[in-house]
């Protein structure tokens, strides 16, 4: 949604399993843009920044939402998890590279001893 004033949070309620229901009051000028196929995602301003709710624009063919309607949400990217997975991938790639280097040294040594 454009700008920080598109909506204001009216409440936040825990729903269990580390999920939270956020109730937003959407400004009238944005109500036509949020449709039944819009998706809400919690985003972060920078790595350690404040969080905000991003709502995708709905398609023109999707129905308008009545007051009190619910839209789908999507989990945000967990950059710490991505970094951990990347770190593990690089560790494995490094180990494989070392094994390849060892094999190449052995092949080079074997070729040198034949000549």
Image: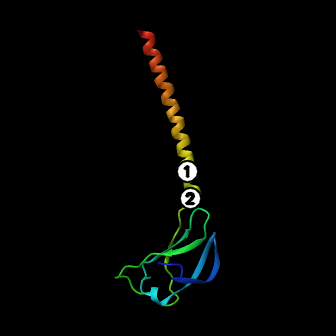
Left or right of residue 15, residue 82 in this image: left
Placement of 85 over or under 22, stated as above or below = above
Placement of 102 over or under 61, stated as above or below = above
Crowding near the residue tagged with mark 2, few <14, some 14–19, many ≥20 C-alpha atoms within 10 Å: few
Residue appearing at x 42%, y 83% in the figure: 33
Crowding near the residue tagged with mark 1, few <14, some 14–19, many ≥20 C-alpha atoms within 10 Å: few
- Residue 91's x, y, as percent? 56, 41
Q: Is residue 65 visible?
A: no
Label 2 close to label 1 by CB (< 8 Å):
no
Marks 2 and 1 sit apart, C-alpha to C-alpha, by 10 Å
Q: Secondary structure at mark 1?
A: helix
Q: Is residue 114 visible?
A: yes
Residue 85, label in figure: 1
For residue 78, which quarter of the picture?
bottom right
Q: Secondary structure at mark 2?
A: helix
Q: Which residue is mark 2?
A: 79
Sequence order check: which comes first, mark 2 or mark 1? 2
For residue 95, which quarter of the picture?
top right
Placement of 92 over or under 23, stated as above or below = above
Residue appearing at x 35%, y 82% in the figure: 60
- Residue 31's x, y, as percent? 46, 87
- Residue 110's x, y, as percent? 45, 15
């Amino acid at each position: 949604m454009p700008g920080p004033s598109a909506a204001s949070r009216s409440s936040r309620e825990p729903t269990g399993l580390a999920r939270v229901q956020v109730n937003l009051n959407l400004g009238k000028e944005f109500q036509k843009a949020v449709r039944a196929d819009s998706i809400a995602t919690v985003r972060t301003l920078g790595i350690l920044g404040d969080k905000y709710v991003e709502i995708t624009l709905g398609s023109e063919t999707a129905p308008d939402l009545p007051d009190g309607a619910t839209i789908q949400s999507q989990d945000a990217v967990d950059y710490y998890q991505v970094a951990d997975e990347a770190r593990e991938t690089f560790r494995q790639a490094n180990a494989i590279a070392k094994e390849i280097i060892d094999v190449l040294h052995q092949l080079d040594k074997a070729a040198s001893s034949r000549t």
